[in-house]
Image (spheres, coloured by chain):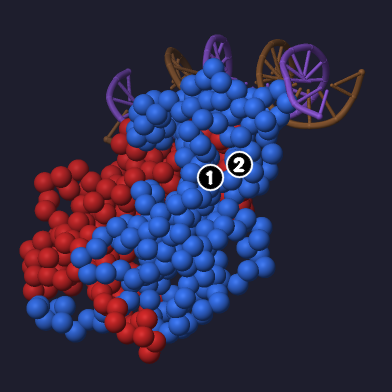
Chain colours: A blue, B red, C brown, D purple
DNA sequence: ACAAAAGTGTTGTTAGTACACCCATGA
DNA sequence: TCATGGGTGTACTAACAACACTTTTGT
């Protein structure tokens, strides 16, 4: 090994994932209570160690799978946390990832071996979380809001067929505010990313609301080309 | 030490900093050619190892200082790179930071012990860079553009007193495009973040251009409150 | 028949875009 | 006097914000 490398200190590297979910009404967060030696009773994000030969996102996915049984969740890197005191046992750098899922889609699949549990965002205030996980969550909420303000990212949090009022509820949950429904539906439909279906959702309201699905082809095209929206949005 | 920690693999953690500079005309990038054993002749970002007891940003600042003598540069975390093969000598996770500085302000201070050198962005194409540093730079450019499209971040790249045409050149360099000067100055002045000074810049043009400075108080206020721009920008 | 949620249109205001001429000065 | 870059105004268009009534249907 090269001299230059030989005398460097190696350091624990952890991955922590923040999983947001929407149940049709509230925005939720998936936490686990792990059966590990330290902090046995503390709720925490889905976390684990980086293994040799593993990519970062790959490790985050594996850990999420091991703790909850969830697979094929698109995880996005959020931020790296490296305060020397963040883990009192030993200095650890943690790389945080986050994802958005639809609670209903995954309810059956989530294993409860490690006591995984959905918390609504307001429940968090009273809760004590491991290490700096609260700061991670706050940053993730900020990023989620930012992303939702740019992309119609919310689609990923809904079932394949959904109604405009459902989508509005989701955005209202993300931004903790309320929108005018006329302006909301106009704005959403003006993207022409939604396809109106013949069916109506029944049961929730007396009248029933039309179901829509995402035109995935258009959606891909539009949001894989970032370039077109940058220059003139500022100047 | 806890069992849970004892058997984990520790890993090298590096910090790499991407330093953008503006010289009044072009957007540049600071690279070094380090006298290290491996890759002696390759240009690279300002990189080094995380030491015990150091925060991540703190380490990035120290490394930047050691390689260039620059201090008091605000570094912002960009992304973490952890491909198992990214460093062929040993598996290393690298956390990338970036910063924007005004070339003229720091020209005297930059030490050239390690052969630090400004490259204009177009020069990069032909250049071979260490490891995945090219990908880091590309991501940093993307982020810089995004930030500039939201905030008037460009102010940090200019001297304390600057002219509107200088600012326009900077934005044109960042976005690799050109803007209508009437619309540009209207847009910039409409933020009322600039204070018009009595003095003119002479020498560059025959007529001379009025100098402006940033109203730092307003600037702080406006861009520390993110919340107000989110909801209605989407809905 | 009535309660509860769905759906829809108009108007005023604001921000964005495209475009062309005169001004001040040094050489 | 002329070449160079600095500075400004207007008219058109598109997006946004505020606002209230009618429709459907289950009970």
**Residue in the foreground of this view, choosing between A47 and D13:** A47
Separation (CA) of disc 2 from disc 1:
9 Å
Q: Indicate the chain on which mark 1 is placed.
A: A
Residue B109 in view (yes/no): no
Of the image marks 2 and 1, the number of the one nearer the N terminus: 2
Q: Nearer the viewer, residue B147 or B152?
A: B147
User: Circle 1 sits on which residue?
Assistant: A104
Q: Picture quarter containing residue B106?
A: bottom left
Marks 2 & 1, CB-CB < 8 Å contact: yes
Residue under the point 58% across and 53% down: A28
Q: Which-is-in-front pick, marks 2 and 1?
A: 1
Q: Which residue in the structure is indicated by mark 2?
A: A24
**In this picture, is A17 found above or below D8?**
below
D15 versus A39 height, above or below = above
Callout 1: SS: helix
Q: Quadrant of residue A232?
A: top left
Image coords of residue B221 (percent x, y): 62, 53
Helix, strand or loop at label 2? It is: loop
């Amino acid at each position: 090994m090269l001299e230059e490398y030989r005398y460097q200190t190696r350091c624990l590297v952890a991955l922590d994932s923040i999983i947001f979910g929407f149940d049709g009404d509230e925005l939720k967060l998936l936490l686990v209570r792990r059966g590990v030696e330290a902090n046995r009773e503390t709720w925490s994000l889905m976390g684990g160690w980086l293994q040799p030969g593993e990519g970062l996102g790959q490790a985050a996915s594996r850990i999420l799978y091991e703790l909850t049984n969830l697979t094929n969740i698109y995880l996005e890197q959020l931020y790296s946390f490296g305060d020397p005191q963040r883990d009192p046992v030993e200095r650890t750098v943690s790389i945080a990832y986050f994802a958005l899922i639809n609670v209903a889609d995954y309810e059956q699949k989530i294993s409860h071996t490690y006591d995984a549990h959905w918390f609504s965002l307001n429940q968090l205030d009273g809760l004590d979380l491991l290490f700096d996980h609260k700061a991670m969550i706050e940053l993730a909420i900020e990023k989620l809001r930012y992303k939702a303000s740019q992309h119609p990212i919310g689609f990923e949090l809904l079932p394949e067929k959904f109604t405009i009022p459902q989508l509005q509820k989701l955005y209202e949950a993300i931004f903790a505010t309320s929108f005018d429904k006329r302006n909301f539906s106009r704005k959403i439909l003006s993207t022409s990313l939604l396809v109106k279906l013949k069916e109506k959702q029944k049961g929730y309201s007396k009248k029933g609301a039309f179901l829509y699905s995402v035109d995935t082809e258009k959606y891909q095209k539009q949001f894989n080309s970032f370039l077109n929206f940058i220059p003139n949005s500022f100047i």
